[in-house]
Amino acid sequence: MADETEISNPLLALIREQQLIDDLQYEEVVAELKRSNAPVIQLLQDFGIMKIDDILHVIAGHIGADVVNIKDREFPPEVLQAIPAKIAQMYHCLPIAINNGSVQVALADPLNPQVADEIQFAAKREVQIVVADPIEVRKTIERVYGQDDTTGGFAEILKELDADKDTLAKEVVEADEGDAKAMEALANDVPIVKFVNLVLQQAIQDRASDIHFEPFETEFRIRYRVDGALYEMAPPPKHLALPVISRLKVMANLNISERRMPQDGRISMNILNRQIDLRMATLPTQFGESVVLRVLDRDSVKLEVESLGFPKYVYDFVTEVILRPNGIFVVTGPTGCGKTTTLYSCLRRVNTID
């Protein structure tokens, strides 16, 4: 149990490694983390184990960065333009200053080693990481960049659903008792349709490879995977779990009345003027059905082998192997690394009339 928590929470592992937390405190934090899933940095403060400044200096010392205070700080337009709004909102990163062509960036998750490289690639300039209070980083990003249209759309739809929550709650109870007509009506309710479409649009816009819909005892979580890392959307109310999952099942032509057996389906739709295929799998859990959507963006896999960025020796080997008349070609790697893109590119090379 402890090992899994350390892996998923590098800050907690770092604090323990430096012996800044005793075993009893550690067990208390782990228990609360499993119960509430609150940020570790917040739990360390709530339990009186460490102050925020001490935590930030531990992080900074570990990654070799400086600590900066961004509260009430003003950001010139040229600094904000160094990181586009979409990148800032997606990676929770805030440009602080520009020095000799490189940009200083504060991250909400400075212990994630991949984020800096991804930001540098997306922003097309050198990035220097600094450490700041993660809560202030998120607040400041919202203040200086504002919310994007999709986030605003979520707020409007959730407001609309909240205004009609009594009627919706009644429909959810009827559907939950096995009323097929009530469940179908719930799945086709206009605000539910809009909400599901916005979730899918947001995930596709952020280049997600998977989308997870997970009902728990007291909450309903929606997460999507981008470049191997899971990002959580603002959790909708728990009572939306059944109508949202029912809507997805309708879209995939699955049996919405069947909730005790796993089901597999497929959704094909146009999102952001792109044809997107979604492979869907449902799994019954203690608190309702869990759904995973695997995203296949047809446009993203229409690549030539030359566009994959292979070193020459790999490119020469691959192009020779895929032209062989028989045999097995194994492509492996973690979620989102490019296996499907690689295979489709190879198929495109050999997909000739003869």
Image: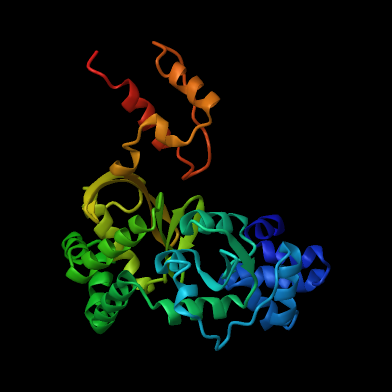
Please determine whether, in this image, residue 189 is positioned above or below residue 282. below
Is residue 208 visible in this depiction of the protein?
A: yes
The image quadrant where one finds the C terminus is top left
Give the color scheme: rainbow, by chain, secondary structure or one colour: rainbow
Q: Residue at x 55, y 89 (%)?
A: 72
Q: Quadrant of residue 243?
A: bottom left
Front-lying residue, 203 or 45: 203
Is residue 216 visible in this depiction of the protein?
A: no
Q: Quadrant of residue 148?
A: bottom left
**Rendering coords of residue 214 (x, y %):** 42, 60
Please determine whether, in this image, residue 292 is positioned above or below residue 217. above
Front-lying residue, 32 or 286: 32
Q: Quadrant of residue 111?
A: bottom right
The image quadrant where one finds the N terminus is bottom right
**Rendering coords of residue 34 (x, y %):** 61, 67
Q: Residue at x 49, y 42 (%)?
A: 337
The number of numbered discs placed on residues in the rendered structure image is 0
Front-lying residue, 76 or 38: 76
Front-lying residue, 6 or 148: 148
Specify whether 126 is left or right of 30.
Answer: left
**Rendering coords of residue 90 (x, y %):** 45, 64
Specify whether 187 is left or right of 102.
Answer: left
Residue farthest to the front? 100
Residue farthest to the bottom? 72
**Rendering coords of residue 271 (x, y %):** 24, 54
Specify whether 66 is left or right of 286.
Answer: right
Q: Residue at x 30, y 72 (%)?
A: 149
